[in-house]
Image: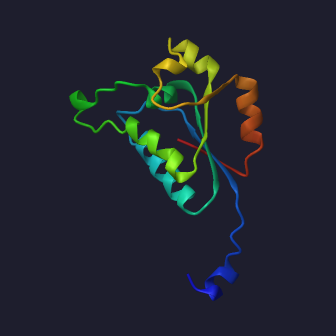
Amino acid sequence: MSDEFEDDFPGEVKRFMFVNRKAPHGTIYALESLEVVLISAAFDQDVSLAFLDDGVFQLRKGQNANVLEMKNFAPTYRALEGYDIEKLYVERESLEERGMTTDDLVVPVEVVDRARMTALMAEQEVVMSF
């Protein structure tokens, strides 16, 4: 990247939160979210992910998407740490409502209640929901 280009874009880091509310298969939302997250991290932004509602299923171990003729991309979440994406939040109530615990998830997460999730979202400069 040239110095002239860098002067035009000072490289200010913004806080991005990507909110995942949809089940992992049957729509493109979950996969699209993951792609946007990786692109944002490549540009050295402060990226966090939130999983609410059926979005918690995106992190579930042992998914079998073969019957839908789709690829199981859940293991890709394990690569996020390599992109310095370490802030993964799961809403406690969403987990409980679906009969899940953190033992069911493919990656370590911070489980927060709805009030804390709302506060985390309010701290962000950009919130994108998928």
Asked which colour scheme the image uses, the reply is rainbow
- Identify which residue, 86 or 64, lies in the foreground: 86
Asked if 84 appears above or below 77 in the picture, the reply is: below
**Image quadrant occupied by the N terminus:** bottom right
Asked if 78 appears above or below 35 in the picture, the reply is: above
Where residue 72 sits, quadrant-wise, is top left
Asked if 26 appears above or below 79 in the picture, the reply is: above
Image location of residue 60, percent across then percent down = 43, 25
Residue located at (41% from left, 44% from top): 31
Residue located at (39% from left, 37% from top): 75
Image location of residue 9, percent across then percent down = 67, 76
Label total for image = 0
Residue located at (60% from left, 42% from top): 86
- Identify which residue, 22 or 44, lies in the foreground: 44
Image location of residue 87, percent across then percent down = 63, 40
Residue located at (62% from left, 83% from top): 5
Image location of residue 19, percent across then percent down = 59, 39
Residue sitting at the far front: 82
